[in-house]
């Protein structure tokens, strides 16, 4: 009796489940397929050298669905506990640290910053800027606060003056702090994250008159002036931007020739307006006027009759691109901002191009920002883009100093002391200082002049190569040329680097295995769907 009832119940269950059996078999097969895919993924990872820690995320854990393995951590009262670490990945933030594309850490020892960036004269160490000092103070406070919870009273700020730091573009400033006392050492990694991008300022420019007025002090140097005009013609050839050129000329034997060249330039370049301001020699000055860059720029800003708002103080040996003119016009803000771009100073072409296995090209073809071709003149502040009203309101340049130099630093100090202006100090790849010989025999500051002359000649690599050429009679022609073959030692190092970074032929078996896996999954899934539909049709027919 009981067996009959059980048989009836089982028959009833089979009858009710009959329409759903194809679906149940499909789900079971999908589950088995996923399990097989996971096993094959583990085989792929082991064959290519991948591990869970070498991936920026893990595909089968909850951490894989969060950024870089972050987690929220335990909270009390809606706030993070001070002793709680908010990240489980010891290598976060993860970036691709390739051999030649590495974001290096700077170092701070509590007194000096050791870095190859941010120094005016290229020093290997310097004092921290004010903003850097504030950042280090925040980092130290947070580190000591955390360690005081873990080890009460063990460390103070004086025990933690070992900070490595770098800026990770996608995350923020990463700081690595090491604290040590009485044989005990603790190391912390902190992140000062970036905030969400915000629009801070919008400034629209309407070029309804001259975009930029260039003020150039000049005496002699006719060949350089001709080159400047040729570059200006090339920059303005499209004709949709209008600029002015005001040359303040200190009287000498080339005055008439320079005046004719300036007037001729306005005729051959339709969108260029020019004017020639002559500063005549004074009594007792001999055959020519005493040159003063500061006095020339001041006279040009005060006496120019060209209609324009933005002034660009420029020298005759400084060439620029069209893109720079756009930045020069757009960057200054009346009453608020002054643009002082950093010029790329070109080395002696006789040094540069022989080492690169090239003939020396014409000057206008040398305008390129490349290693060993020049350097960023971080200490120079002479190129300025500023509203004329702001310049005159700041009382302009010092006019009592003769010759070149000094007036730019004094003007920068005036801008900073005023307090209302922000100085935009930026590397500009569209602004070039041409190389020219420098005579230090009669210079007022002879040692500073000699130092400058050495900096302008060539890079350290180039000077070293030429030194060994003279010392050991070696041929250095084409040493820095592109495409030179690596030495055996370099090739071996490259192979080791490739192997250690997990790239190269070692990836090939894993890629093939992954391709086979994907193809198998797609074919098998198609067969499952086809069989499922066929079973549904058969069930309906019954």
Image (cartoon, rainbow, N blue to C red):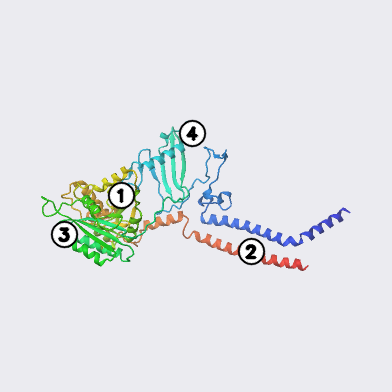
| Closer mark to the observer between disc 4 and disc 2 | 4
Residue 377 visible at all: no
Q: Is 440 above or below relative to 510?
A: above
Tag shown at residue 390:
1
The quarter holding residue 352 reads: bottom left
How many angstroms separate mark 4 from mark 1 (CA)? 52 Å
Kindly report the distance in space between the C-alpha atoms of the residues bearing marks 3 and 1: 31 Å
Could you tell me which secondary element the residue under label 2 belongs to?
helix
Mark 1 or mark 2, which is nearer to you? 1
Point out the image quarter for the C terminus: bottom right
What residue does disc 4 label? 148
The reply to whether discs 2 and 3 touch (Cβ–Cβ < 8 Å) is no
Q: How far across and down, in percent of the image, does residue 282 sit?
A: 13, 51
Which of the two labelled residues, at mark 2 and mark 3, occupies the earlier sequence position? 3
CA–CA distance in space, label 1 to label 2: 72 Å
Q: Position of residue 258 (x, y in %)?
A: 18, 61
């Amino acid at each position: 009796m009981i067996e009959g009832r059980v048989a009836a119940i089982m028959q009833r269950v089979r009858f009710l489940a009959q329409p759903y059996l194809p679906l149940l078999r499909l789900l079971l097969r999908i589950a088995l397929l996923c399990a097989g895919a996971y096993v094959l993924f583990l085989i792929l990872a082991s064959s290519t050298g991948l591990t869970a820690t070498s991936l920026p995320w893990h595909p089968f854990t909850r951490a894989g669905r969060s950024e870089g393995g972050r987690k929220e951590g335990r909270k009390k009262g809606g706030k993070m506990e001070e002793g709680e670490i908010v990240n489980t990945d010891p290598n976060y933030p993860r970036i691709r640290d390739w051999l030649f594309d590495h974001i290096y850490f700077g170092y701070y020892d509590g007194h000096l910053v050791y870095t190859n960036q941010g120094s005016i004269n290229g020093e290997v160490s310097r004092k921290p800027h004010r903003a850097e000092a504030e950042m280090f103070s925040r980092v130290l406070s947070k580190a000591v606060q955390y360690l005081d919870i873990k080890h009460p009273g063990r460390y103070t700020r004086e025990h933690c003056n070992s900070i490595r730091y770098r800026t990770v573009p996608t995350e923020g400033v990463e700081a690595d702090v090491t604290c040590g006392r009485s044989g005990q050492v603790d190391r912390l990694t902190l992140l000062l994250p970036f905030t969400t991008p915000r629009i801070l300022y919008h400034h629209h420019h309407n070029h309804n008159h001259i975009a930029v007025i260039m003020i150039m002090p000049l005496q002699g140097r006719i060949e350089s002036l001709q080159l400047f005009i040729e570059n200006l013609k090339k920059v303005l050839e499209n004709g949709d931007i209008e600029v002015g050129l005001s040359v303040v000329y200190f009287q000498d034997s080339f005055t008439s020739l320079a005046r004719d060249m300036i007037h001729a330039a306005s005729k051959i370049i339709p969108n260029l307006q020019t004017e020639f301001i002559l500063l005549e020699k004074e009594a007792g000055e001999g055959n020519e006027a005493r040159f003063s860059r500061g006095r020339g720029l001041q006279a040009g800003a005060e006496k120019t009759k060209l209609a324009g708002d933005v002034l660009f103080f420029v020298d005759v040996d400084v060439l620029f691109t069209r893109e720079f003119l756009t930045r020069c016009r757009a960057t200054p803000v009346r009453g608020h901002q002054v643009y002082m771009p950093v010029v790329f100073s070109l080395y002696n072409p006789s040094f540069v191009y022989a080492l690169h296995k090239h003939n020396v090209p014409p000057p206008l073809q040398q305008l390129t920002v490349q290693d060993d071709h020049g350097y960023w003149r971080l200490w120079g502040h002479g190129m300025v883009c500023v509203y004329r009203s702001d310049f005159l309101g700041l009382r302009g340049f010092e006019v009592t100093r003769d010759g070149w130099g000094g007036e730019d630093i004094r003007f920068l100090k005036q801008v900073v002391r005023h307090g209302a202006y922000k100085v935009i100090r930026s590397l500009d790849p569209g602004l070039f200082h041409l190389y020219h010989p420098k005579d230090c025999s009669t210079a007022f500051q002879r040692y500073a002049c000699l130092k400058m002359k050495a900096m302008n000649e060539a890079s350290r690599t180039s000077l070293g190569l030429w030194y060994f050429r003279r010392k050991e009679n070696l041929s250095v022609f084409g040493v820095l040329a592109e495409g030179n073959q690596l030495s055996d030692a370099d090739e071996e190092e490259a192979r080791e680097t490739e192997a250690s970074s997990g790239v190269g032929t070692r990836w090939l078996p894993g890629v093939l295995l992954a391709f086979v896996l994907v193809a198998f999954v797609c074919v098998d899934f198609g067969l499952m769907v086809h069989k499922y539909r066929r079973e549904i049709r058969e069930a309906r027919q019954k």
